[in-house]
Image: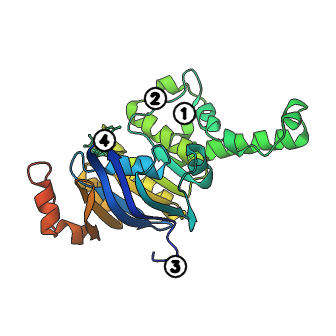
Amino acid sequence: MADAQPLLQVKGLTRRFGGLLAVSALDMSVHRGEILGLIGPNGAGKSTTFAMMAGAIEPTAGEMYFEGQSLNGLPTHAFAARGIVRTFQHNKPFDSMSLQENVMVGMHSQVPLSLWQVVLGTAKARAFEKHVHEKALHWIDFVGLGEYAKADVHTLSFGQGRLLEIARGLAAQPKLMLFDEPAAGLTATECLRLADIIRGIAAQGIAVLLIEHDMAFLMALAHRVVVLNFGGKIAEGSPAQVQAEPAVVAAYLGQLKVPHA
Ligand SMILES: Nc1ncnc2c1ncn2[C@@H]1O[C@H](COP(=O)(O)OP(=O)(O)O)[C@@H](O)[C@H]1O
Ligand SMILES: [Mg+2]
């Protein structure tokens, strides 16, 4: 797990909203193939941290390095182009499209063709089209929705919609996936499926950063956990280590039950 260079490294990452310090001098790193849990009570700064890592909001201070290169000051689309993909709590599929079409939309940025190659229907354009169809099907299969590939997205259940969102994210060829509460609203059976999918993603060498309220789900899945409270890091280590930290137990008192190691 501890390869020489982290995939993502943040140093002194800080974000203010007016007088509020949402994230405060955060140092952390994520490695390829690692499932890293990011936990903390409501308002601790988890989603704000994700928003900065995805390039959706700018840090007030601090540095972020991805594959050793600075992300500072880059536009949002550059974060995605480098391989950082965030999936959302509330999935928003495109209306009146099949699952496959929905996933293909996420692949538009990979088009290696000129407009003329597309317009003229060249062999290269046809080959790329075939590649896009196959890749989309591959990721739909990967999340277990293969039999619904041609179905309209409206026919999906809430939980299936969440899985489709993950397939869309994977089609963008991420190196790092940010999951903000992916288990929220899922049934127990769907949570098990989701856990398998996340393990399968990490097994391919993709780094997974996971925010999750369901502690049993997160602790069973994460290789390592970072704990935030009031924007600052209060603990870091294996699931067993952080659950045994008095500061972590205290931060969660009255909020959530933390299963003791
Ligand atoms: N866009 C915003 N404008 C003002 N305050 C914000 C904004 N986003 C988050 N906050 C505040 O920053 C703090 C951290 O929020 P957030 O990162 O969403 O926490 P978490 O995801 O850990 O629950 C909270 O106090 C929240 O109210
Ligand atoms: Mg949040």
Q: Residue furthest left?
A: 254
**Sequence-first disc among 4 and 3:** 3
- Front label number (1 vs 3): 3
Callouts 3 and 2 close, C-beta under 8 Å: no
Asked whether residue 182 is in view, the answer is yes
Contact? badges 2 and 1 (CB < 8 Å): yes
Quote the CA–CA distance across marks 3 and 2.
42 Å
Q: Nearer the viewer, mark 4 or mark 3?
A: 4
- Image quarter for residue 189? top left
Residue located at (26% from left, 48% from top): 213
Secondary structure found at label 3: loop
Percent x, y for residue 226? Answer: 30, 63
Labels 2 and 4 touching (C-beta < 8 A)? no
Which disc is residue 148 wearing? 1
Three-letter code, disc 2: Leu
Quick check: 21 left or right of 161?
Answer: left
Q: Which one is in front, 21 or 50? A: 21
Front-most of 68 and 103? 68
In which image quadrant can residue 236 be found?
Answer: bottom left
Earlier residue among tags 2 and 4: 4
Q: CA distance from mark 4 to mark 1?
A: 46 Å
Disc 2 target residue: 156
Reading the image, the residue beneath label 4 is 18
